[in-house]
Image (cartoon, grey):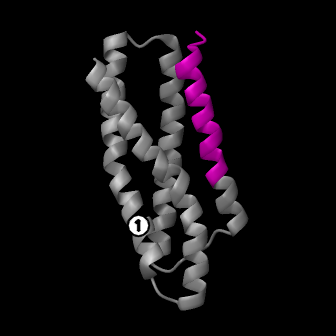
Amino acid sequence: MTWLKIIHILCVMGWMTSIFAVPRALIYWKRDFAKTGEFGPLGDLTYRLYRFSAGLAVIAAITGLWLGVLWGFPAWLHAKIALVVLLAAHYVWTGVLVGRAKRGEFRESDLFLRIFNEISVVGTIAILWLVVAKPF
């Protein structure tokens, strides 16, 4: 079970990097696109980071559910899974934004993207609290 936990944590760390970085990178990509009118290296990096982390998200979900089976799905884990599903929805929405950006469509304001970015931080803190405190 130790290796399963290690793989899970490693993949979660990689996925979280994208969850935190991509919305912020979209702000800079938007500014860069406004200046140059081109996709550019920042757009390429943002797109590749998002795409790479999708695989990590899948592995994190599989190993997390596997751990849940081994632990018998305690009550706190149900709450964690619900929050992870919301975080995954946030990630999918980020993918929609990246797809639009790749086509040169930047509909959201910088302020929206900043707030959108911070929502994931709040969700992550709640998930970490459940994992560490196991309140129920």
Q: Position of residue 25 (x, y in %)?
A: 54, 65
Residue stretch in magenta: 117-136
Seen as rendered, the residue at the extreme bottom is 36
Q: Residue at x 69, y 61 (%)?
A: 112
Q: Is residue 126 magenta?
A: yes
Mark 1 surroundings within 10 Å by alpha-carbon count, few (fewer than 14), some (14 through 19), many (20 or more): some
Can residue 102 be seen here? Answer: no
Disc 1 residue type (three-letter):
Tyr
Q: Which residue is tagged 1? A: 47
Q: Position of residue 103 (x, y in %)?
A: 45, 78
Q: Quadrant of the C terminus?
A: top right
Q: Majority secondary structure of the magenta segment?
A: helix
Q: Position of residue 12 (x, y in %)?
A: 41, 38
Q: Residue at x 65, y 39 (%)?
A: 122
Q: Which of the 4 quarters of the picture holds residue 46?
A: bottom left
Q: Residue at x 52, y 64 (%)?
A: 97
Q: 61 or 28, which lies in front? A: 28
Q: Residue at x 32, y 16 (%)?
A: 69
Q: Is residue 2 magenta?
A: no
